[in-house]
Amino acid sequence: MSLKEASNGWFNYLRSKMPNIDTEKIEKIANEREKICSECKSLNYSRIFSRYTCNECGCALPALLFSQGKKCPLGKW
């Protein structure tokens, strides 16, 4: 994940905590991705981030789910 994709993901994650019309679409996509990721064997709990990360790309789950430009490295979404 590039720095741009990571920052976009974290920005959208934080924006989703302040609901408005613009964030509903992002939140819906993130929720769909989360359902897929939660069943994936590459999902790992990281003590470094104190949250889940993807073993394939190393991204923290919130940034991964909320980044509009990021694609699943396994092609699941």
Image (cartoon, rainbow, N blue to C red):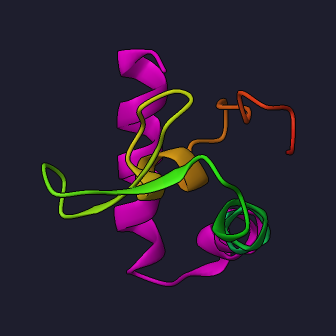
Residue most extreme to the bottom: 19
Which residue is found at the position 44% from the left and 55% from the top?
A: 44
Q: Position of residue 22 (x, y in %)?
A: 64, 67
Q: Is 73 included in the stretch rendered in magenta?
A: no
Q: Which residues are magenta?
A: 1-29
Choose top left, top right, bottom left or bottom right for residue 2. Answer: top left
Which residue is found at the position 51% from the left and 27% from the top?
A: 57
Which residue is found at the position 68% from the left and 60% from the top?
A: 37
Q: Is residue 6 left or right of residue 39?
A: left
- When the figure is inspected, residue 8 is found, relative to residue 61, above or below; the finding is above
Nearer to us in this view, 22 or 41? 41
Give the total of numbered labels: 0
Which residue is found at the position 59% from the left and 54% from the top?
A: 65
Q: Is residue 37 left or right of residue 4?
A: right
Nearer to us in this view, 40 or 76? 40
Q: Position of residue 13 (x, y in %)?
A: 43, 62
Q: Position of residue 27 (x, y in %)?
A: 64, 72
Nearer to us in this view, 77 or 3? 77
- When the figure is inspected, residue 65 is found, relative to residue 55, above or below; the finding is below
Q: Quadrant of the C terminus?
A: top right
- When the figure is inspected, residue 49 is found, relative to residue 29, above or below; the finding is above
- When the figure is inspected, residue 11 is found, relative to residue 26, above or below; the finding is above
Q: Is 4 included in the stretch rendered in magenta?
A: yes
